Amino acid sequence: MNLLFLTPRLPYPPDRGDRLRAFHFLRQLAGEHQITLVSFVANEAERAFVPALQPYCAAVHLVEQSVWQSATAVLRHLHRPEPLQLRYYQSAAMRQLVDRLVATQPFDAAYVHLFRMAPYVAHHPQLYRIVDLTDVISREITLSLPYRPFLWRTIYRMEQPRIWRYEQQVVQQFEESWLISEADKVALTAVYPQANIHVIPNGVDTDQLKPLSRLRQPNSLLFVGHLGVFHNVDAVRFLVEEVLPLVQRHVPDCTLNIVGAGPTEDVERFGDHFGVKITGFVADLNGVLNETAVFVAPLRFSAGIQNKVLEAMAAGLPVVTTSNVNAGLKAAVGEEIFIADDPAQIASRIIELLRDQPLRERVGQAARQFVRQKYSWHHVSGRLAQIQAAMNNQNT
């Protein structure tokens, strides 16, 4: 299949959720399909990552749009009914590029990563158009509102209905839509039952992420996530200020390692707390996972499936997270994952695991087996093969 592949951010390095999903889809599909990648870059420096993507692409086309240009586009259209983040990625240069490529290349289908890129192929019905919504963003915004500062809460209250309307519009307009979790599919099909929505979960490379023979550090906790994303910043604050002190009352030498790219100043300040280390980005995540006793992900709001939790489970780590996170995962509580929502319950689950090594090993092994069986990047290959077979049948 000749595939046009559109992304709002260059899908490399795969250091955050959206880039991670797009990169692995690109890599997974490259062996069977001819891919033309079209992406925004924020500056000239990002072009240095193109060589890492070229082995998977027949061609790579970039449109540079600075943060200043994007912010200006948003301010000019505050009064419009479209989502602000749609305007953030508005570009005449991108539209001209996509139109030219579609007019001159025999594409069979277009994969659009996130609804922000949907307008660039919305007027090309000759293509089989796939929009990868990933998550129902409007749903995540609703969940996040109680935790946001007043100014951002006001902005997101305005943005949420705009996004919800546009999400419904896109699933009606495109030939099919993809989501990470069944819960988000239910939310969209409830208002538009005819929508052709497929659940394509994120995956984990279980050959790369696996338990090693090294000794794990006793009484050590680990949090992993992009540290510039609001739901992760909130989870870190919640963990450091409300959960960790309760754990340290019973396990005084308990330590917490916070790992991830782009830590904000607020996150950096948490390093002043006793037992807390802000590591930032690490290249060898498997090494960090295998030094740790328990993985913690107390996200109070999120949508879809958290890849950081899948990665920890793949490495054989017992995970303590929230019911909100497991709504997407659907792991067996108490067997493959531990679930708690308030600080005292979360601390209790952590303490239980820290004090019981056989329990940690049993839950970690079950978690790894769960991920191996349920979460693979091969799902996307299977869905594209089905689409191609349907196209071939129509042409015969």
Image (cartoon, rainbow, N blue to C red):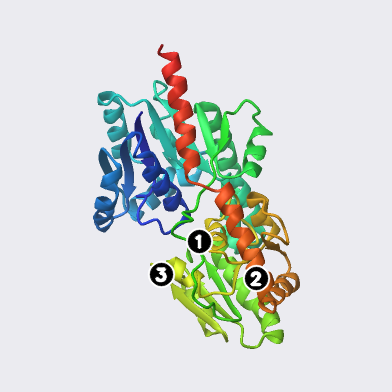
* Mark 3 or 2: the one toward you: 2
Q: Earlier in the sequence, mark 3 or mark 1?
A: 1
Q: Residues within 10 Å of mark 3 (few under 14, many from 20)?
A: some
Viewer-proximal residue among 164 and 283: 283
Circle on res. 179: none
Q: Residues within 10 Å of mark 1 (few under 14, many from 20)?
A: some
Viewer-proximal residue among 273 and 65: 273
Labels 3 and 2 touching (C-beta < 8 A): no
Q: Residue 154 appears in which quarter of the rendering?
A: bottom right
For badge 3, the amino acid type reads Val
263 up-or-down from 152: above or below = below
Q: Residue at x 62, y 25 (%)?
A: 194
Per the image, label 3 sits on a secondary structure element best described as: loop
Circle on res. 360: 2
Q: Residue 344 appears in which quarter of the rendering?
A: bottom right
Viewer-proximal residue among 282 and 228: 282
Q: Residue 49 appears in which quarter of the rendering?
A: bottom left
Q: Position of residue 58 (x, y in %)?
A: 26, 37
Judge from the rendering whether residue 334 lies leftward or rightward of residue 367; answer left or right: right
Q: CA distance from mark 3 to mark 2?
A: 24 Å
* Residue situated furthest front in the rendering: 213
Q: Quadrant of the N terminus?
A: top left
The answer, for residue 77, to whether it is visible in the render is: no
For badge 1, the amino acid type reads Val
Q: Position of residue 52 (x, y in %)?
A: 28, 52
Question: Which residue is identified by label 3?
Answer: 282
Q: CA distance from mark 3 to mark 1?
A: 17 Å
269 up-or-down from 382: above or below = below
Labels 1 and 2 touching (C-beta < 8 A): no
Question: Which residue is identified by label 1?
Answer: 229
